[in-house]
Image (spheres, rainbow, N blue to C red):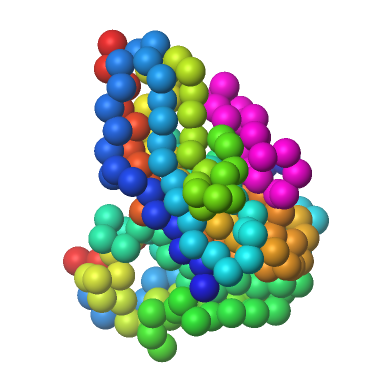
């Protein structure tokens, strides 16, 4: 069975500071990994995904994530936070050959001026 | 493309009433997913369809919940009878392919259900 753990239900940063949102996965086989973002009162949209190609994945809005098999991690980073980045971020895992996603509990990113 | 369309966006009903949530997936997509989002349990997969056929409904909470996909462009999630603990945001999502874990799922805006 696949599972995802997101450390920290809330992360607060100042505008311009580094954003780091943590995600660890559990899987019996190397999975596919995703980060989705949810803005208030909206559905989820894809930020980026790892599909066994390059381990460093770049996504939209300046976000990137690195797949580290030895650490079973897929942390999301952005060098400089903007106020518009305030949202909830979800890490998700999908086993190869299956189309279903298992989501983490989410991390709310708060950005202060 | 208009994206995934869900209706209604908000539904307030009384305990015991029947509730029907509707979803129109992106045209040409072959997989459709229903999720429920609550503060306590996060995002849970309820059921998913491949080519209009239900594949896994193990996430459906109980027999009060049912889902159908009569054609490639329409799906419903029905709760009968509804209970206060069903209050949540229900999302529909679609993806292009069947059985490809690399596919992006495209989410609708959700239906916020409140059962009084």
Which quadrant, please, contains the N terminus of chain B? Answer: top right
Figure quadrant of residue B97: bottom right
Q: Is residue B61 above or below residue B20?
A: below
Q: Give percent across and percent down for residue B3.
A: 65, 45
Q: Give percent across and percent down for residue A56.
A: 64, 34
In the picture, measured across the screen, residue A20 lies left or right of residue A27, that is left
Among all residues in the image, which is located at the extreme bottom? Answer: B63
Q: Give percent across and percent down for residue A55.
A: 67, 40
Q: Is residue A85 above or below residue B116?
A: above
Among all residues in the image, which is located at the extreme left? Answer: B116
Residue B109: tell me if it is visible: no
- Magenta stretch in the rendered image: A48-64
Does the magenta run of residues contain A55? yes
| Residue at image location 57% in from the left, 44% down from the top | A68
Does the magenta run of residues contain A61? yes
Given residues A44 and B25, the one toward you in this image is A44
| Residue at image location 75% in from the left, 44% down from the top | A53
In the picture, measured across the screen, residue B106 lies left or right of residue B13, that is right
| Residue at image location 75% in from the left, 56% down from the top | B96
Which quadrant, please, contains the C terminus of chain B? Answer: bottom left
Marker count (numbered): 0
In the picture, measured across the screen, residue A84 lies left or right of residue B88, that is right
Q: Give percent across and percent down for residue B44.
A: 43, 65
Q: Is residue A81 above or below residue A53?
A: above
């Amino acid at each position: 069975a696949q599972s995802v753990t997101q450390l920290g239900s809330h992360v607060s940063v100042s505008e311009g500071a580094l954003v780091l949102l943590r995600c660890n996965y559990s899987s019996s086989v190397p999975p596919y990994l995703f980060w989705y973002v949810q803005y208030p009162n909206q559905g989820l949209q894809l930020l980026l995904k790892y599909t066994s190609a390059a381990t460093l994945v770049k996504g939209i809005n300046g976000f990137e994530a690195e797949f580290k098999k030895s650490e079973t991690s897929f942390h999301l980073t952005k060098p400089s936070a903007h106020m518009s980045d305030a949202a909830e971020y979800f890490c998700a895992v999908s086993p190869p050959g299956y189309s279903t996603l298992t989501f983490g509990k989410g991390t709310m990113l708060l950005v202060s001026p | 493309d208009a994206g995934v369309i869900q209706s209604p966006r908000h539904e307030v009903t009384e305990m015991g009433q029947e509730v029907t949530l509707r979803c129109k997936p992106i045209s040409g997509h072959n997989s459709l997913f229903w999720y429920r989002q609550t503060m306590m349990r996060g995002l849970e997969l309820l059921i998913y369809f491949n080519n209009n056929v239900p594949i896994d409904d193990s996430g459906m909470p109980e027999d009060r919940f049912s889902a159908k996909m009569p054609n490639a462009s329409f799906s419903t999630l029905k709760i009968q009878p509804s209970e206060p603990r069903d209050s949540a945001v229900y999302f529909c999502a679609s993806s292009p392919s069947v059985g490809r874990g690399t596919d992006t799922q495209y989410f609708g805006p959700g239906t916020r259900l409140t059962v009084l």
